[in-house]
Amino acid sequence: MLGIELSLDRPVAEAVDLAVVAEDEGFDAVLGSCHYNNRDPFVTASRIAAATETVRVGPAAANPYETHPAALASRVTTLDEVSDGRALFGLGPGDRSTLANLGVERERPLRRVLETMQVARRLFDGERVDHDGTFEAVDAGLNYGVGDVPIYVGAQGPHMLRMAAKYAGGVLLNASHPDDVAWAAERVEEGLAERDPDREDPEFVVYAGVSVAEDGVAARDVARQPVAFVVGGADEHVLDRHGIDADRAREVGAAVEAGEFEEAFDLVTPAMLDAFAVAGTPGDVVDRFDALLEHADGIVVGSPLGPDPAEGIRLAAEAIDRSVRAERDR
């Protein structure tokens, strides 16, 4: 998969326009970020589906805490219907700091995601479902026919990566640095060793925060915003891998959770940018994409895209094209 992720802090109409640009530039998926304080990803995805013809559409990644998993499955299958079978179900444990704003504790995230995926597949198959685990369902079912929507699990930690490789249709690794992707690829291989041999292997896709512009300084400055959200929820072993001070990372996370976003962005260090974003000139981005694709099957180009998002999509498409060609020629 070669996709674009759009942060839905922008108006829906603007997101639709950017999705059209992404389709024109050859991307095959457009995904919407999932945060309660931004536009609804399913409403936006339905508008994107109406304005496009070929790209897959869906959330990246919806969490099964703010919405009951059975209702979440119904939203995805409704999207699949209105998009003529182009829905993609991005599923993950959610952003800890954002969920805290809703009074939601992210308890047992691996089990919650796994059980949601298992229940969703049964609902997709037309079954009535009873479930008693991290959530309850009693004779739950969908009163309309649905198809088989591919489920991509957003993962970062070792256990979620292994679980996604063992059970999901795709792995969406939240990472932007080759060292993290190389480490994650090993965890994916561990999960694949336990996968049902009758099932096709999942696609391993890097979901990277990207900011690209001819002005590399401007591109890196814009990248501070998504990096602040990633750093605040990053596992300590990831911080250690990149030599990032855990106390500084906690300060960033606390500022995000308090809604002090400008303060959080100012706390982001150059080391954090290098670890958690692909940011700079087109040449910088090509080099990083080359390194990421040594370990992964595809890339989702995440927000902010660049100081000019439409131009960022075009430059990212060119960078991916050069990287894919280089990988094919090796």
Image (cartoon, rainbow, N blue to C red):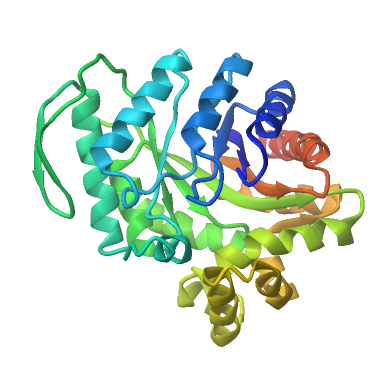
Q: Residue at x 43, y 49 (%)?
A: 154
Q: Residue at x 55, y 31 (%)?
A: 44
319 sits to left or right of 46: right
Residue 243 or residue 314, whichever sits in front: 314
Residue 89 position (above or below residue 188): above
Q: Residue at x 47, y 50 (%)?
A: 36
Q: Residue at x 39, y 58 (%)?
A: 187
Residue 291 % position (x, y): 67, 53
Residue 103 position (above or below residue 328): below
Residue 123 or residue 186, whichever sits in front: 123
Residue 151 position (above or below residue 25): below
298 sits to left or right of 136: right
Q: Give the quadrant of residue 269.
A: bottom right
The quadrant of the rendering that contains the C terminus is: top right
107 sits to left or right of 238: left
Q: Is residue 196 at all visible to an observer of this figure? A: no
Q: Give the quadrant of residue 74.
A: top left
Residue 185 % position (x, y): 47, 54
